[in-house]
Image (cartoon, rainbow, N blue to C red):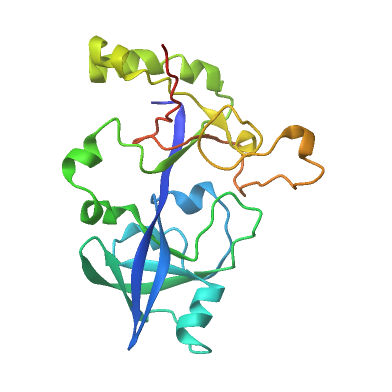
């Protein structure tokens, strides 16, 4: 879609991590290659625009670098991650400042979405009903999100066929990033009631103007509406 400037898929998996003779159970995040163009998480060491361009690169948070390597410089050190059925070698290419606790996106270990084929088969990766990753899109400046949403039904009818589209009961849409943690109309993510905002600080991501579409492959957000 010409209105979309950037798109990023993001999800996490449970994994085993081997560093020298030690092994750990960790949560590993997987992100699209434009992740650091869209979000301004602070990179302390490494070139952020190249980190996710290779399937064998890995980024660590400060706390994870300290946990694995102590006071030794971790850049260009190897760690092994279980991605799918096997362990693969990854090269530490960057260190990021620990993600703030009030961010809606959390990670301590980050690898590229180029590793998806190791986790999911081709059918899953190409299926329009694959809702595993969260998908964020940044629209071009001046774009009206509503005008983009109006294009979704036509796109889905063309891709799925009229009958499959009707049976799916999917109602894809765009949700502003600032709306994620207060809008209880969407089933994905954690939300708070606006009346309770004085008790719970608003979670926020560090991105500039963008809309996100949660958990729908290739930049389409899923919002399920059931009918009787």
Please determine whether, in this image, residue 82 is positioned above or below residue 121.
below
Q: Position of residue 143 (x, y in %)?
A: 55, 24
Q: Position of residue 151 (x, y in %)?
A: 41, 15
On the image, which quarter does residue 156 sit in? Answer: top left
Q: Nearer the viewer, residue 171 or 36?
A: 171
How many labels were placed on the picture? 0
- Residue 101 in the figure: left or right of residue 52: right
Q: Nearer the viewer, residue 13 or 34?
A: 13
Q: Residue at x 54, y 51 (%)?
A: 105
Q: Position of residue 160 (x, y in %)?
A: 24, 19
Please determine whether, in this image, residue 105 is positioned above or below residue 181.
below
Q: Residue at x 17, y 43 (%)?
A: 122
Q: Position of residue 217 (x, y in %)?
A: 34, 36
Q: Residue at x 37, y 17 (%)?
A: 169
Question: In what quadrant of the picture does the N terminus appear?
Answer: top left
- Residue 137 in the figure: left or right of residue 155: right
Question: In what quadrant of the picture does the C terminus appear?
Answer: top left
Please determine whether, in this image, residue 64 is positioned above or below residue 191.
below
Q: As drawn, which residue projects farthest toward the front? A: 228
């Amino acid at each position: 879609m010409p209105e979309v400037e950037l798109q990023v898929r993001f999800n996490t998996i449970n994994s085993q991590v081997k560093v020298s003779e030690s092994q750990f159970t960790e949560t590993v995040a997987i992100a699209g290659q434009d992740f650091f163009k869209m979000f301004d998480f602070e990179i302390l060491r490494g070139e952020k625009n190249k980190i996710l361009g290779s399937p064998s690169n890995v980024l660590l948070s400060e706390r994870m670098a300290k946990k694995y390597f102590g006071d030794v410089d971790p850049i260009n050190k190897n760690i092994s991650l279980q991605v799918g059925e096997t362990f693969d070698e990854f090269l530490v290419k960057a260190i990021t400042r620990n993600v703030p606790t009030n961010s809606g996106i959390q990670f301590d270990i980050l690898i590229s979405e180029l590793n998806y084929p190791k986790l999911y088969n081709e059918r899953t990766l190409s299926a329009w009903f694959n809702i595993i990753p969260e998908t964020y899109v940044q629209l071009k400046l001046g774009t009206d999100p509503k005008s983009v949403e109006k294009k979704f039904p036509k796109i889905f009818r063309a891709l799925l066929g009229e009958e499959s589209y009707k049976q799916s009961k999917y109602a894809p849409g765009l949700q502003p990033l600032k709306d994620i943690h207060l809008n209880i109309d969407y089933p994905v993510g954690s939300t708070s009631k606006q009346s309770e905002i004085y008790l719970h600080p608003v979670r926020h991501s560090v991105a500039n103007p963008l809309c996100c579409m949660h958990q729908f492959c290739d930049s389409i957000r899923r919002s399920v509406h059931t009918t009787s």
